């Protein structure tokens, strides 16, 4: 029975609670980034190599931002979810974006917005320069 429900969720992504968590997290992240002086350049940039949640300008630096939202810490903190494998994937997509947009000479970094969707008020943390280029 549980497996059938899980499979049905995957067939109909609009009922997937993980997708709702992700959308809520990205909305909160963009709001927090703007409040901290970032200018949003692009959201959900996709290429054949993968996706970057948010690309934003922070002063003279282009920030590639990974958003991780969690309702509980059962599977670890949101920041811990940005594994070395995920960092490599984000790095490859960021390099492709820089090349595609002719900005290879631009200063860039990787930030993480970690969100705990707690009852009441969510906890949002921005980690600037969270990891180095991992390509």
Image (spheres, rainbow, N blue to C red):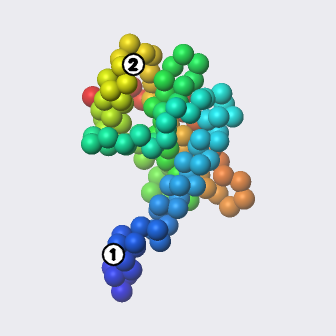
Question: Where is 120 relative to 108, above or below?
Answer: below
Crowd rating for badge 1 (residues with CA inside 10 Å; few <14, some 14–19, many 20+): few
Whole-angstrom CA distance, mark 2 to mark 1, is 42 Å
Q: Given this view, does label 2 or label 1 mark the residue nearer the observer?
A: 2
Q: Is residue 110 above or below residue 61?
A: below
**Residue 42 in view of the camera:** yes
Q: Where is residue 100 in the image (x, y as percent from the top left)?
A: 32, 26
Q: In this view, does 35 lie to the left or right of 39?
A: right
Who's the residue at 34% across and 82% down the image?
Answer: 4
Q: Which residue is pictured at 47% across the width and 62% down the height? A: 18
Q: In which quarter of the image is the N terminus?
A: bottom left
Asked whether the beta carbons under mark 2 and mark 1 sit within 8 Å of each other, the answer is no
- Residue 23 is situated, as x and y percent measured from the top left of the image, at 53, 55
The numbered mark at residue 103 is: 2
The tally of labels here is 2
Along the horizontal axis of the image, is 36 left or right of 111? right
x and y percentages locating residue 115 in the rendered image:
57, 48
Residue assigned mark 1: 7
Is the residue 48 above or below the residue 9 in the image? above
Q: In which quarter of the image is residue 104?
A: top left
Q: Is residue 82 left or right of residue 34?
A: left
Q: Which mark is residue 36?
A: none
Name the residue at 36% across, 19% down: 102
Quadrant (top left, top right, bottom left, bottom right) of the C terminus: top left
């Amino acid at each position: 029975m549980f497996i059938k429900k899980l499979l049905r969720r995957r067939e109909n992504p609009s009922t997937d609670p993980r997708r709702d968590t992700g959308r809520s997290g990205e909305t909160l992240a963009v709001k927090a980034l703007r409040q901290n002086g970032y200018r949003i350049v692009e959201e959900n940039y996709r290429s054949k190599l993968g996706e970057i949640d948010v690309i934003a300008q922070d002063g003279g630096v282009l920030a590639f931002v990974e958003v991780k939202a969690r309702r509980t810490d059962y599977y670890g903190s949101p920041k811990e979810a940005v594994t070395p494998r995920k960092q490599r994937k984000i790095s490859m997509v960021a390099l492709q974006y820089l090349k595609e947009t002719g900005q290879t000479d631009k200063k860039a970094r990787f930030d993480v917005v970690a969100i705990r969707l707690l009852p009441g008020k969510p906890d949002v943390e921005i980690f600037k320069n969270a990891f180095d280029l991992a390509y």
